[in-house]
Image (cartoon, grey):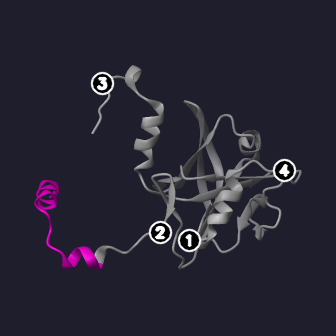
């Protein structure tokens, strides 16, 4: 394992590889404006913040062509992609004149597009926006949500993956010494 000693020694490409070791779900964040303009971007930066009140967050690159629409709309929808929606993830990750062309969706609260057949949709009102480094962090209060019994699309190490239920397999196997020691320390 390679360690860096200070910020000056950080290799940004190598740091990106380290960040890629953290598996995430895949979302398409959508919004719309009062005049009917729509925006959507693929994001794996989505996370939950609080249950009471229900707050979520996600971030968008400061150079994104969609940034201004998200900054001014006041709302967004998080579309948690299902395993079968890899092509939607790819479509919304690329620049395009109309990313919604040929995509099945309905208008959610305040018009944010809700993509069809997602594992979950979470509709939010923007509560805060913060410039953090080279991204803008959006915090939103959950206004409405839905979810289906669908396997989520996952992303790990620069690739799409699918998850597996490990509970039954792990419960049947003896713990390694390292796992046993860690579990004993956390009790």
* Percent coordinates x, y for residue 2 in the rendering: 29, 35
What secondary structure prevails in the magenta region? helix
Circle 1 Cα neighbour tier, 10 Å, few/some/many (<14 / 14–19 / ≥20): some
Name the one closer to the observer, 165 or 139.
165
Q: CA distance from mark 4 to mark 1?
A: 26 Å
Image coordinates for residue 40, horizontal then vertical, percent: 72, 53
Q: Is residue 77 visible?
A: no
Give the crowd class for mark 3: few <14, some 14-19, many >=20 residues within 10 Å.
few
Name the foreground residue: 127 vs 22. 22
Q: Secondary structure at mark 4?
A: loop
Q: Which residue corresponds to mark 1?
A: 83
Q: Nearer the viewer, residue 113 or 96?
A: 96
Separation of residues labelled 3 and 1 (CA atoms): 39 Å
What is the quadrant of residue 100 in the picture? bottom right
Which residue is denoted by mark 2 in the rendering? 162
Write the residue at 70% across / 72% down: 116
Residue located at (55% from left, 30% from top): 133
Spatial CA distance of label 4 from label 2 is 30 Å
- Whether the residues at callouts 2 and 1 have beta carbons within 8 Å, the answer is yes
Residue 184 lies in the magenta stretch = yes
Q: Earlier in the sequence, mark 2 or mark 3?
A: 3
Kindly identify which residue carries mark 3: 5
Instruction: Give the residue at x 76% y 39%.
Output: 68
Which numbered disc, 4 or 1, marks the residue that appears first in the sequence? 1
Q: CA distance from mark 2 to mark 3?
A: 35 Å
Q: Which residue is mark 4?
A: 97
Please give left or right for residue 98 compared with residue 129 in the image: right
């Amino acid at each position: 394992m390679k360690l860096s000693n200070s910020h000056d020694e950080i290799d940004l490409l190598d740091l990106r590889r380290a960040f890629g070791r953290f598996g995430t779900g895949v979302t398409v964040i959508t919004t719309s404006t009062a005049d009917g303009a729509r925006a959507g971007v693929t994001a794996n930066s989505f996370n939950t913040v609080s249950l009471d009140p229900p707050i979520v967050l996600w971030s968008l690159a400061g150079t994104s062509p969609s940034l201004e629409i998200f900054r001014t709309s006041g709302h967004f929808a998080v579309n948690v992609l299902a395993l079968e929606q890899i092509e939607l993830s790819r479509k919304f990750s690329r620049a395009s004149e109309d990313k919604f062309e040929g995509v099945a969706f309905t208008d959610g609260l305040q018009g944010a597009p809700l993509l069809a057949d997602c594992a979950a949709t979470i509709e939010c009102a923007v509560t805060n926006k913060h410039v953090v480094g080279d991204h803008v962090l959006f915090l939103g209060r959950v206004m409405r949500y839905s979810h289906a019994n669908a396997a989520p699309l996952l992303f790990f190490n620069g690739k799409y993956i699918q998850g597996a239920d490990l509970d039954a397999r792990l419960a049947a196997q003896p713990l390694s010494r390292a796992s046993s020691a860690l579990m004993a320390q956390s009790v």
